[in-house]
Amino acid sequence: MYRTHTCGELNIKSVGINVALSGWVQRSRDLGGMTFIDLRDRYGITQLVFNMDTNATLCEKARKLGREFVIQAEGAVAERSNKNLKIPTGDIEIIVQKVEVLNASEVPPFTIENDTDGGEELRMKYRYLDLRRTIIKESLELRHKMAQEVRNYLGSKNFIDIETPMLIKSTPEGARDFLVPSRMNHGQFYALPQSPQTFKQLLMIAGYDRYFQIVKCFRDEDFRADRQPEFTQIDCEMAFVEQEDILNVFEGLIKDLLLKIKGIEFDGPFPRLSYNEAMEKYGNDKPDIRFGMCIKELSGLVKGKGFNVFDSVEYIGGICANGCADYSRKQLDALTDFVRRPQIGAKGMVYVKYNTDGTFKSSVDKFYDENELKKWTGHLEAKPGDLLLVLAGDKSGTLNALGELRLEMGNMLNLGNKDVFAPLWVLDFPLLEWDEETKRFYAKHHPFTSPRPKDISLLDKDPAAVRANAYDMVINGVEVGGGSIRIHDRHLQQKMFKVLGFTNEEAEEQFGFLMNAFRYGAPPHGGIAFGFDRLVALFAGHESIRDVIAFPKNNSGRDVMIDSPATISNEILKELSIKIESQKK
Amino acid sequence: MYRTHTCGELNIKSVGINVALSGWVQRSRDLGGMTFIDLRDRYGITQLVFNMDTNATLCEKARKLGREFVIQAEGAVAERSNKNLKIPTGDIEIIVQKVEVLNASEVPPFTIENDTDGGEELRMKYRYLDLRRTIIKESLELRHKMAQEVRNYLGSKNFIDIETPMLIKSTPEGARDFLVPSRMNHGQFYALPQSPQTFKQLLMIAGYDRYFQIVKCFRDEDFRADRQPEFTQIDCEMAFVEQEDILNVFEGLIKDLLLKIKGIEFDGPFPRLSYNEAMEKYGNDKPDIRFGMCIKELSGLVKGKGFNVFDSVEYIGGICANGCADYSRKQLDALTDFVRRPQIGAKGMVYVKYNTDGTFKSSVDKFYDENELKKWTGHLEAKPGDLLLVLAGDKSGTLNALGELRLEMGNMLNLGNKDVFAPLWVLDFPLLEWDEETKRFYAKHHPFTSPRPKDISLLDKDPAAVRANAYDMVINGVEVGGGSIRIHDRHLQQKMFKVLGFTNEEAEEQFGFLMNAFRYGAPPHGGIAFGFDRLVALFAGHESIRDVIAFPKNNSGRDVMIDSPATISNEILKELSIKIESQKK
């Protein structure tokens, strides 16, 4: 037996008993007559004491134990004279009688502390050491707890956990699939699922009524920051439901998680915004509503006053930054530079300082007098001491730029408190998006999303105007989940494929099984999927999902610890009947 | 709102209330004045009544509803005159006031009944209809319940659920990997995991102490009956443990499942057999101990009596089939044919009938008189009325044949009661297996399995004699789980790789990350993995794991419903820099 207790459970009540502990040497302090070792395991840290006077040999042995050595120690629990109130075991220590090295350790390449000296690349290479750090361990423990709670909650609501296959069929719609050559079926490939979408719909058709799964999904994207080629979804579907039923159930799930995991009681329903409202108030379809600073249109107020920049554009809008009237020239220039970045794309920025003494100072004083500016500040509900920031241009681009500027100001003013969770639903998304390059419509969510019933007639006349029965859940500016009521009528699904430019043959080849299933009594159904990595990161207060994944890949999709992907022998490729083409120059 | 209740919850207490139900038409009966419809959903069946006298139009409408139509019905709950005691809703029916077709259905290609008229191929093609059958639905509900219970039990024992990656690195040791070409890394491939083995070991090195995961694994095998290319494991690992600790925890898990899922209380510890004992008593390393009929060696008793067949072989052994002394010539011939099948490989079979009148009749009467035969029956503890079946040959082959014969007799005599669960541990497996073809040793479990400490010195001298710190859990003749104490010492692991014929370079390339991790304080650890599909099938009383998998593949690895694997366009293959070689003739 390696231990009688863990390093996290002994306390003042244990004084006097003999124990065996096993763990890692976190640190050791040699005070001449005494040597102290902090022994660490998953559960905590316990102090070991070795006394030169009573057992010199043992004390000498203890002094040779290096950082991260794995040891077993036996001894008696004693009360500490110098208590450590910061840890649950801080009242006691172990007077060691016997110590054994279970495994030695070389000096680790970085310190195993929350504030480590290791850079990301090094820590990823030695991820098994990085995972020893408390901050990462707590993230993975949180992830475990959240997964258990999701399962308990959905289980209590009659959801049934059903595993859908990982080796499925490639569908060219959407992002790129990862493919898996089939050795047994020459020249053919499986694909890894981007989501279990069609399978969960088939489960509804099969009568399973309420399905969920916490499931790995795969997307072969050109890697962007904080994307992983494999990621985890909480995937759910319900039959015989309307949008309202789904919003209620999953609002319940998030409230349950906030309560059970974070101890936050959320009263009342989550706010709801239409896609249009979100865009017009926040310039963003995943608004961070922890703070206001909403966008307001100024076009009506500011046009026709001889300022050509405003007169010539579609839209003028602004935000009000509280208490920023004293911004310096330099600060304002930095904001102007920010909005002019190519990815934001504004041409310039107009400001109005509503000074604390009630006077105004703006970058457009030539065109607008105090009276006019007063109207602006009135419209934006500014008080003395506030700063208005105004952008102009085409409507959609300007709203987007104002949205980015709002987030930047929120950041600078520290308005996004990590301990506050501000969830909301965004509803009534457009069903389709026009792509200028390929001159066709794409599904904004996916091709199975139902249009709002009253918009179905628009599918022929004005596809861009059709709204979807779709919804996103957003928390603190992060889209944590999204879903829709699905099409369950074969003819409507056929029409949808047609609008998306599928030929009948393509629709049949890729989704024939689903269209067929619709022939045999498909119930009305809908669902949602949450990005589990993202949700855990949000709850853990981490910026990156990598911090809540045990073995993440880097931004080129590599696992630098195991050095994967890797080359494969020609014999094995031959068995798969595939050959590697030489690299494109 | 589509429903106020499900089809499984209304009972005599609900009489008088108005309800809305949604579901599928299971069957309808038109009795002239009255039409009855059984409405089905996941939760049960509720009878709908339509009366020609009170509402002829509605009744006419009801008569047109075909099998598997999806409908919504509103009406009042009434007490039935003709109660159905077999179902929980059998006391009531709904007097329907309004009915709406939510979706029509074509006539399904087979009946949606437990006793369906559909063959396997057809049912797999229309799996979404097959899944509607109660027998399959109950299997998947059982699977869900078992998964939840496994998670609750292990969670309560401080195990933490950690997701390991799906896109990993290929290792040629063991079965074939499924490969995934990387688009971003030219000419390189990920592999799908056959198990999270190395990752769970790294988690122990990282200090996670107790890990579990219910996880998909992949094996590209030449498909055998009842194997799936993707399957699910309950994967577990513990640190600072010896074999005994692991046996206790996971014996606890299986006892918990038997109790919570099957209502079976299992007293006392599970029986334990060494691999050698299992082979000698049952001719099998996964013995079905629901019945006895153990093998006994007869060599000492039967040799040297002038019967050359026995005198010339290594081993003679037999089993005693209770009450089979009256077997006919034809029955005995059939058993002889059975053991002579090539896959069993016995040359012939000797029988001894111990007749109820106390006389003996055997196929070797010429060589053995009544006195001699009495010794045989005495050794095999036969009573009058029993039949001895005796095989001879080389020891390992004959034990194997006797084991098969024992199972065949157990089957014929119906000794394997499906409601009885007889678990046991098989211990002390050989560490290595010699392969004649490639003239090298292979790891019987895998290369990370620890030898028993007292056998380590044999690794150089006599590798075949080394026993492993490995264990299998067997229930009713099915190996449901297996695991081992792992090597945690770098030098021992290196030696193991050497014994297995790895060069240093190969070991480094494939498992360098693990060997490296051993440098930084690897604790003693071990684990186990259960075949979850197999375990659920056993609990469900199904022969095939396909019956407990929502969307299984057939024996050629195809999903015939979605028609996968499938060909891929050349453009996509080009992006992946791979080409298909023409098929070998």
Image (cartoon, coloured by chain):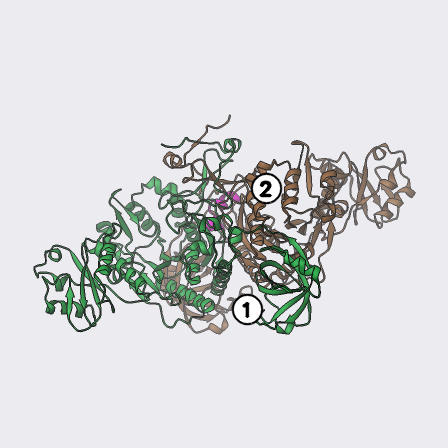
Chain colours: A green, B brown
Residue type highlighted by circle 1? Ile
Residue B251 visible: no
Q: Residues within 10 Å of mark 1 (few under 14, many from 20)?
A: few
Q: Position of residue B50 (x, y in %)?
A: 41, 64
Residue A185 visible: yes
Q: What residue range appears in magenta?
A: B119-130
Q: Say whether marks 2 and 1 touch (CB < 8 Å).
A: no
Q: Residue at x 15, y 68 (%)?
A: A360
The front one of B433 and A151 is B433
Q: Position of residue B85 (x, y in %)?
A: 55, 66
Query: Is residue B60 left or right of B122 when viewed as pictured?
Result: left
Q: Position of residue B316 (x, y in %)?
A: 81, 39
Residue A413: image quadrant is: bottom left
Identify the residue position indicated by label 2 in the image.
B225
The C terminus of chain A sits in image quarter: top left
Q: Is the stretch drawn in magenta largely helix, strand or loop? A: helix
Residue type highlighted by circle 2? Ala
Residue B182: image quadrant is: top left
The N terminus of chain A sits in image quarter: bottom right
Identify the residue position indicated by label 1 in the image.
A87
